[in-house]
Image: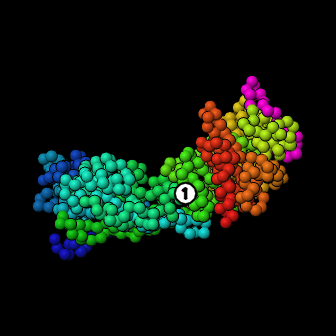
Amino acid sequence: MSAIRRSVVALSVASLVMGSLSACSAGAPDPAPSADALASAMNSGDFSGVQFAGSNAEEAAKALETAFGSMGEIKHTSTVSSAAEDEEEQDGVKTATANITTVWDVDKSDKDLSYDTQAVWEFDSEAEAWKLRLDPAIFAPEFESGDYLKASFEPAARGNITDAEGASIVTNRPVIRVGMDKTHTEKENWESSAKKLAKLVDIDEKAYAQRVMAAGEKAWVEAIVLRDDATREVTDAEIKDIPGANFHNDELPLAPTRSFARPLLGSVGKATAENIEKSEGKVKAGEQIGQSGLQAAYNDTLAGTAGVSVSQYTAEHDAVAELFTTAAAAGEDVKTTLDVKLQDAADDLLAEADSNSAIVVIRPSDGSVLAASSGPVSSGSNTSLQGSYAPGSSFKVVSALAMLRDGATPSTKVKCPATAVVDGKSFKNYDGYPASAVGTIPLAEAIAQSCNTIFVNQGQDIGGKKLAEAAAALGLLAEDGTGTGAAFGSVPEDSEGTTQAANMIGQGVVESSPLGMATVMASIQAKSTVQPKLVLEPAPQAPAKPASTLTEEEAEQLSTMMAEVVDHGTLKDLKSAGSGKIIGKSGTAEYDSEKNAHAWAIAAQGDLAIAAFVEDGDGGAQSAGPLVKSMLEEAAK
């Protein structure tokens, strides 16, 4: 191939004459339909609608696959710019020429690779048809037999997930990719080595051995990716001591620790076939993409844009010319409100949890979510932001607000009988409820001791609508403004009878997430309705304002009652958690025929509001209370 031919490749689209086609000589039909058939075949790979001179559709399809096959998932479109019979015959044969414009949608921007080629037909007078002269240069400029286009990609640097100050939480950290290189040991060792390696790194031995045996004879079969830091227990020597086992150094976007906000932040991994298919060409094989959590929700922001180059190669795989190139554009950071110290503390408390559990910490003054931890770590469930459970007696602060709005005050005398009957259903106070708090007591004491019957009896008078309005005023029915797809709570307006009675004590059909109850606590502490935020940049859509808002006077009355819960009520163990006023409320929601209970505790001190939840607990004060106390103590350090 001459250097001159290889040195010039047309990259820009030439100005071509559009519109009317030149008239054909007598006896020759318009070549435009034949040109359109060729363009269609170049787009689909099916040349059955094209007639050929000296070749056939199968040869054309193979030539197209050779020319374009290495472009992978990049889409192209070929169109006819012009088609006309040539003015002069060639060796006594009528010919026609079409200009074909091919455009490749190379990257995510508006920048494309576009070029023009020419195709020539000769007229078969016996068949009265135009027949294509197959030439590789139809597919790309200056192509010869065996030439092809190939796209190469340069990965973009992934953005980080940061705290509110811009300090990286998730950033590239060193890892090792551990696996088997089948070329580094004898065939008879493959299965036994695979099982030894799987046992060493604590993965399924049988499954990994099957993967190794099913792979090609020269394959590298990855077993696991391990953090390459002080937490790594498997040593280099232990890996290399197994015939064929080895590791490669790499980097991955990771949080400070394996457990740090894991369900919230999510993970990054190689794109699966399903990821690639759903992306419609945006995601390439081998690309690292977000698989869950914020990494998946904000993948477009974090991933950036890969650099792309398209080059022309000879049949001998020699590069001829670079036809197109764009530099990789690094991804942008996702900024959050998380406080690393508090998140770490919450994660540590829940790391060994026996059931789904959560701790959410909000700064009431601005609604920032400082921690959103979900346990146990191994479950992967985002209980803190998306769990939905009966809130039990922690919901009584909502019911109390509805009663305040109906004319009550913290000192209003209310009746707390041992039992209450609504529509034939009997309700009672919890086992161990103090006898001294039975009878006529102030509403504040009913909150402090968590009397059920007073609220059950008030259900009909309050009604579903007023209860829902009180919940909205405390932020429990908010639209998500965290940018995480979070849930808050649900309080139906149409509940009646025993359902409404049960709703008043946080059972029935009312539900909340841990985030929802933390928002209730934050609103009371802030003395206004709080709308939590977690992702700061890119800014999520602002949520709608609540249907009802909390007044300062209402918040002060609730705060007064909740201070007595800590002073001498169900959360008196919190008094030693730190200096300054602490307010709170415990909650227990029985389920499963009263064999199990959801345990809740909410509390606030200074500019901190906390909700703790344990799905299978002994009671709010017993199971969730210590979690809140630990968080208050950590915040005070």
Magenta-drawn stretch contains 421:
yes
Q: Residue furthest top?
A: 424
Camera-nearest residue between 570 and 97: 570
Camera-nearest residue between 396 and 549: 396
> Looking at the picture, how far across and down is residue 286, in whole percent?
35, 58
450 in relation to 105, above or below: above
| Residue 491, quarter of picture | top right
Residue with the mark numbered 1: 261
> Looking at the picture, how far across and down is residue 257, in whole percent?
50, 61
Horizontally, residue 464 falls left or right of residue 247, namely: right
Quadrant holding the N terminus: bottom left
> Looking at the image, how many numbered discs can be counted on the residues?
1
Name the residue located 39 percent from the left edge and 59 percent from the top edge: 225
Task: Say if residue 323 shows up in the picture.
Answer: yes
Name the residue located 57 percent from the left edge and 53 percent from the top edge: 350
23 in relation to 248, above or below: above
Part of the protein shown in magenta: 401-427
Name the residue located 70 percent from the left edge and 56 percent from the top edge: 609
Q: Residues within 10 Å of mark 1 (few under 14, many from 20)?
A: many
Q: Amino acid at mark 1?
A: Ala
Q: Disc 1 on helix, strand or loop?
A: loop
347 in relation to 451, above or below: below
> Looking at the picture, how far across and down is residue 523, in whole percent?
73, 53
Magenta-drawn stretch contains 172:
no
